Amino acid sequence: MKRNRKSSLISGQMSSQRKNMTLLAVISLALGAAIVSQAGLLAEAVQRVFVEKAGLSSVSLLLGLLLAVMVVRTLLSYGNGKVGLRMAAAAKTNMRASVLKSLTRASIASTLRGQTGGKVSIALDAVDEADSYFSQYMPRMMEAALIPVLILVASFMLHANTGFIMLFTAPFIPLFMILVGLKTKNKSEEKYALMAEFSGTFLDSLQGLVTLKIFGRAHRQQQEIERSSLGFRDATMGILKIAFTNTFMLESIVMLSIGIVALELAIQLLVFKSMTFHTAFFVLLLVPEFYSLLKNTGTAFHNGRTSMGAVRKVEGILQETAEQGREADEEAGRADGIQLEVSQVFNPSMPPSIELDCLQFQYARDSFMVETGRISFGPGEHIAIVGKSGSGKTTLLHLIAGLLKPESGTVLVNGRPLSQYDENVWFKHISYITQHPYIFAGTLAENIGIGAGGSFTRAEIERAAEEAGLAALAAQLEHGLDTFVGEGGRGLSGGEKQRLALARAFLKRPLIILFDEPTVGLDLHTERVLQHSIAKLAQTATIITVAHRLYTIQKADKILFMDNGALADFGRHEELLERLPQYAEMVDVQRKGGLSS
Ligand code: ADP
């Protein structure tokens, strides 16, 4: 089953490129004809000039023809390469498009799974690696399938003995290559594993340089890098050793085969005098072409194998996302069968009501479980989620946001299950302000603009920045809102990043705000700015905060107290103080200045 799927991407590409494949076959046949004609013409010219002692003028036409055939041969070779490149370009575009399509189609929950780096490397590198399957392997294989046969037929017609020698020695070349291939396969897998280890160690060390220095581990890490780089070197040298021995053996086989043919020809020509010089020379010119084609096939085969590995990786990710997509579709289908339009459910001036209907969620079997029971939040209510670190607050927030799917139970938004909503429609109305918002490489203004999705004016961005308290920061910067931030740009402090996230929200004007309140103490000014901005955003939205500030908690319409995954109780501050001793204890700790996280 798996194997069938593996080749399906290649065969899919092949069938969509049937025209190019036919073109390759035609060019290869023409190339074979050119090779045979070139040898024939050259043999004829030598025969006339050296054996028959004809004047140069009498062979000028022949030489002209020979030159023309050589030019045609070069052009055909070039043409074959060109068709291969065209096929590779088309195949890569198609593959990249399907990878991107499947990744963008995947649900948010599934995109969060797995390594981002791995996905990027598949979308970019693996597809690139697949190039040589089409640009090298296919043209060479087509040549190898057609031209040697043509040469063999010509040789048999000219001198059957040579044909037999070629027929018997030729199989040794692929046979030998298979043997070497088997030997190098393990070695090259080992090399890739060592390469991955090496780059992993290197990246880790670079990213954690400050930590390593502080803990005095820099020297240890240096030794570690040295060790893994030496390991990688040894593996590479091992492969090179096999490759060089391989080339030497291969050349020996080819030389030996050509030698046998030449010896046989010489005996026929000189001892038995049973053939003309013309035929012998013709055959002798054809034979090296035959073997060199077979040798090229070996190299192409090796390239093809590497590319197949890459193609398999691409197929893997396509299959995985397709399965996840199916699951998501099934889930949506089970729930409703219809997708809701935004206008049907959301009133742009009215935050929705949210109801949690006995949600249950686990990251893994037998692990920590989040359970909520039944609870509803009215439009525009301010909800605070509190509890010890690790009690499931963030998990609950993600469940409400639809970033995680509950195993059982439903999140109802305006009375309808969240799964009925189109992901895009839902996320259009949500802002999630995390403690560590992601800042993309780009200007401040561009980073704010990400929040809105649609079209917006510069004035709107400036207003959002102003409302989020970013204007003062922008005023200090030489390029203002056009200053580069994120990777490679100016760094931003934690408080500045949150203000940027708030500016995104101000531009978007969401109906639901999910807010992960900072756990670390911010300076008084930043604290005020954040509080003020959040309060302003909350006027027109339902806001659900993972709260750490007593101020936020006291003002909340409902406080959800999480205890080891379970929603232990909910109510207003005073109510919980009265009936939940753990809550009273937590508040007491907060009052004394301790911080829960
Ligand atoms: P809180 O926000 O209250 O600190 P979280 O919701 O982040 O708690 O985490 C609750 C529990 O779930 C913790 O025990 C944590 O280790 C676990 N957890 C959080 N994220 C994951 C994840 N992606 N995979 C597995 N376990 C997780």
Image (spheres, helix red, strand yellow):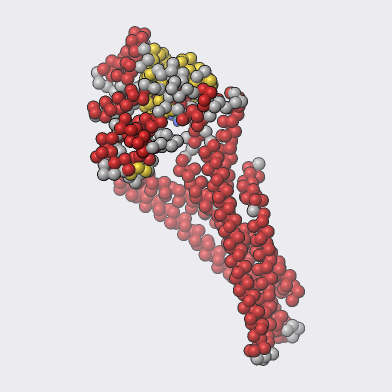
Q: Residue at x 66, y 51 (%)?
A: 15
Q: Residue at x 30, y 48 (%)?
A: 219
Q: Where is residue 256 in the image (x, y as percent from the top left)?
A: 63, 73
Q: Is residue 415 visible?
A: yes
Pick out the residue farthest to the top: 578
Examine the rendered structure and indicate whether residue 431 appears above or below residue 231.
Answer: above
Examine the rendered structure and indicate whether residue 284 appears above or below residue 417.
Answer: below
Horizontal side, residue 96 vs residue 209: left or right: right
Examine the rendered structure and indicate whether residue 72 appears above or below residue 121.
Answer: below
Report how many numbered discs are placed on residues in the image. 0
Horizontal side, residue 274 vs residue 591: left or right: right
Q: Residue at x 52, y 61 (%)?
A: 242
Q: Residue at x 31, y 30 (%)?
A: 467
Viewer-nearest residue: 321 or 380? 380
Q: Which quarter of the rendering shows the C terminus?
A: top left
Q: Where is residue 135 in the image (x, y as percent from the top left)?
A: 58, 58
Q: Quadrant of ligand 1?
A: top left
Q: In which quarter of the image is residue 390?
A: top left
Q: Which quarter of the rendering shows the N terminus?
A: top right
Q: Position of residue 170 (x, y in %)?
A: 67, 67
